Amino acid sequence: MKGIDTIAVFAARYAHHRNTAASFAFLQNIRAVKDQLSDNCKKQLVQESHEADYNLDDWASLRDLFDK
């Protein structure tokens, strides 16, 4: 995994279980760097997005962004 991939996965894991704007901020930043992420990272982010407890619309948007 590249450094940006690791940061993205850790940031997503942080935001999954918080009822704050963290998921929205994460999603906005991921949109800005999506072309720099590896395919494996994108797949992992989508898979782990199902673990989120809050802000489920944000996580659905992430899946829409990467699911093909």
Image: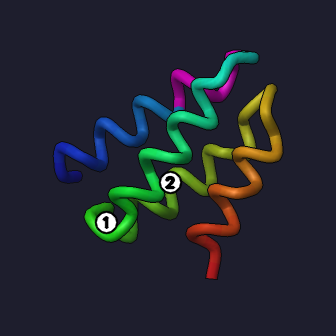
**Residue 68: x %, y % from top left:** 62, 83
| Residue holding disc 2 | 44
10 Å crowding of disc 1: few (<14), some (14-19), many (20+) = some
**Residue 34: x %, y % from top left:** 39, 63
Mostly what secondary structure, the magenta segment? helix
Relative depth, front residue between 58 and 16 = 58
Q: Hey, what amino acid is under mark 1?
A: Ser
Where 20 sits versus 60, above or below? Answer: above
| Residue holding disc 1 | 38
Relative depth, front residue between 30 and 4 = 30
Between the C-alphas of marks 1 and 2, the distance is 10 Å
Q: What element carries label 1?
A: loop
Q: Provide the residue span drawn in magenta.
A: 13-18
Relative depth, front residue between 2 and 64 = 64
Where 11 sits versus 17, above or below? Answer: below
Q: Which residue is drawn at 75% across and 17% down?
A: 19
